Amino acid sequence: MNIVGERRVQKPPFPHRLSAMKSLARHAITAAALTLIPSCAIPNLSQSPGAYTILTRDGRQVMCDGEPVLQESTGYYRYRTPEKRDAVIRQDDVASIQKRSV
């Protein structure tokens, strides 16, 4: 104990242990963050519904994730792009749809 003026000031017991505990907690949080962040950024390709290629009559190839679905009421195929956006293409423009091997 130290005496400051007329009051006694008590130092925390084992201050080196407190700083070690803070350091350990900081390292644990950093390790957890470094483990979780890359797993969120990497897409899981094994759970993809399938990759398809739409071949158009003018010779273009349109890549899509999942099988395109024909909306008979509108005459358009609806599909999802590799960038995870919904898109449509006219049924008259489609020559064939092929499943790609991933």
Image (cartoon, rainbow, N blue to C red):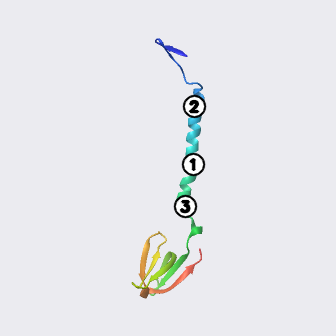
Q: Position of residue 38 (x, y in %)?
A: 55, 56
* Residue that badge 2 annotates: 18
- Residue plotted at (59% across, 34% down): 20
Residue type at tag 2: Leu
Classify 10 Å Cα crowding around label 3: few (below 14), some (14-19), many (20 and above).
few
Q: Earlier in the sequence, mark 1 or mark 2?
A: 2
* Residue that badge 3 annotates: 42
Q: Is residue 97 above or below residue 46?
A: below
- Residue plotted at (54% across, 64% down): 43
Q: Residue furthest top?
A: 6
Q: Earlier in the sequence, mark 3 or mark 2?
A: 2
Classify 10 Å Cα crowding around label 2: few (below 14), some (14-19), many (20 and above).
few
Mark drawn on residue 32: 1
Q: Quick one: SS at disc 3?
A: loop
- Residue plotted at (42% across, 75% down): 87
- Cα distance, mark 1 to mark 3? 16 Å
Q: Quick one: SS at disc 1?
A: helix
Q: Nearer the viewer, residue 7 or 20?
A: 7
Q: Position of residue 41 (x, y in %)?
A: 52, 59
